[in-house]
Amino acid sequence: MTGITAQALNKVSGLNAVLRDWRLDRPPILVLGDGLEDFELMRHVSSWPTAFVACPESARSKVRDYVQAQGGVIYPSGRADIALELAGRTGKR
């Protein structure tokens, strides 16, 4: 038996494919996440003028530290609505 994996597929490559297909260039984006793939996506969009990042308190420390350094929101687990509301107030969504 042979295992087949798509190593080149991840959240960043998926986002890039959507942006290319929809002909969008750095649109407003909100990235919520708690793991390392989410961290990579957050880093990927960090230079976008309207990027907003957030994570739950239970996120990996690397993600929490990054979100805090970027001026994002760290919200109580299960309360992503807080991040959505704050992103809307800042116009970054």
Image: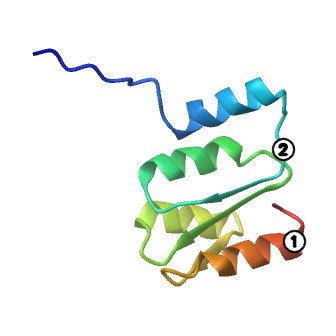
* Residue 3 lies in quadrant: top left
* Residue 23 lies in quadrant: top right
Residue at which label 1 appears: 90
x and y percent of residue 45 in the render?
Answer: 70, 45
Residue at which label 2 appears: 27
Considering only vertical position in the picture, is 20 above or below 66? above
Residue at 38% from the left image edge and 25% from the top image edge: 7
In the current view of this chain or complex, which residue is farthest to the left?
Answer: 1
Q: Looking at the image, is mark 1 or mark 2 earlier in the sequence?
A: 2
| Quadrant of image for the C terminus | bottom right
Q: Secondary structure at mark 2?
A: loop
In the current view of this chain or complex, which residue is farthest to the top?
Answer: 2
Q: Residues within 10 Å of mark 1 (few under 14, many from 20)?
A: few
Q: Residues within 10 Å of mark 2 (few under 14, many from 20)?
A: some
Residue at 44% from the left image edge and 68% from the top image edge: 59
| Quadrant of image for the N terminus | top left
Q: Amino acid at mark 1?
A: Thr
Label disc, if present, on residue 76 of the rendered structure:
none
Relative to 35, 20 lies left or right: right
Relative to 88, 79 lies left or right: left
Q: Amino acid at mark 2?
A: Pro
Relative to 36, 67 lies left or right: right
